[in-house]
Image (tube, helix red, strand yellow):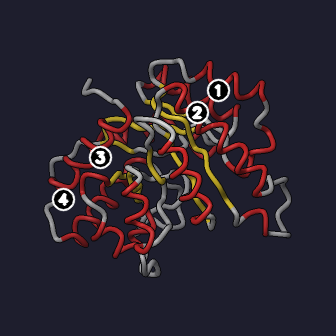
Amino acid sequence: MKTELIDTHVHLYSHAYAADLGAVLARAVEAGVVTCIVPGTTLKDSRAAVALAKRQSLYAAVGIHPTEADNLTPQSLDELRALAQHPRVVAIGEIGLDYYWPRQTKRDWPCAAPARQREALQAQLELAAELHLPVIIHDREAHEDMLEILAAWVAGGARRNGTLHAYDGGPERLAAVLELGFYIGMDGPITYRKSPELPSVARQVPLERLLLETDGPYLTPAPHRGQRNEPAYLPLIAQRIAELRGMPVETLIETTTANARQLFGISEE
């Protein structure tokens, strides 16, 4: 199988990779993953993502995750702006809305309220527009608010687009997302038996709007579910989507890699 894949979302600065990152990257190359995009979730993570991109010939995105939105201050926004000047930063992200975690009363960590999340999202969307960068969007149980905010942002100027990472909006919202010019990121859950809506999404999304991602170390695909995820497992995701679409996996890989290069401005090195 010819492979030249791009993992468009993997948190390689995670402590889960601290002991063997070199081996993880070597296995990725063996699996045909030519590069990865490492998105930040906090200011600290964003710094780490840029540092990794410099050292490992990867790419970075910088941003503050919605659950961390209380930490987005004018000062941290200025630092994100400065980090984003590095040529290997290709997006603002991971940003968005997460209405699941604020409702969980048993969590033992602070989580930003929805209103604060919306403020932080708006600020980072404007940063992306200012810097002419695409966005990597996290949307968990906030679909209607997310679509409304993104529609207003897209209408505000030219070249405003991005990807809904780990897409979970169901087939019923797919047309609205595509109309905004956004891409759809798909990952490990497409290989799970108990994901009733994702096969329909995988079949319906236009091939030219599809991106592949692992979201490592999370969302590990079958048959490795329960273990740490890593970029070397990306071909499993590609294979499953190709099966669902009834098409050669080589064609799917070639097109999704071209999609990633186009959206994020990644040239062939």
The residue positioned 45% from the left and 69% from the top of the image is 173
Image x and y of residue 105, in percent: 85, 69
Image x and y of residue 191, in percent: 38, 70
Report how many numbered discs are placed on residues in the image: 4
Q: Element under label 1? A: helix
Image x and y of residue 143, in percent: 57, 65
Q: Element under label 4? A: helix
Q: Element under label 2? A: strand
Side (left or right) of 165 relative to 31: right
Judged by depth in the image, the label closer to the viewer, 3 or 2, is 2
> Which of the 4 quarters of the picture holds residue 199?
bottom left
Real-space Cα distance between discs 4 and 3? 14 Å
Image x and y of residue 135, in percent: 50, 41
Residue 172 in the image: above or below residue 268: below
Which residue in the protein does label 4 denote? 249
Side (left or right) of 110 relative to 11: right
Decide which of tag 3 and tag 1 comes sooner along the chain.
3
Task: State the residue in front, 4 or 175.
Answer: 175
Q: Identify which amino acid the numbered label 3 is placed on.
A: Ala
Decide which of tag 3 and tag 2 comes sooner along the chain.
3
Which residue in the protein does label 1 denote? 80
Real-space Cα distance between discs 2 and 1? 6 Å
Decide which of tag 1 and tag 4 comes sooner along the chain.
1
Which dot marks residue 31? 3
Disc 4 crowd rating (10 Å Cα; few below 14, some 14-19, many 20+) is many
Real-space Cα distance between discs 3 and 2? 26 Å
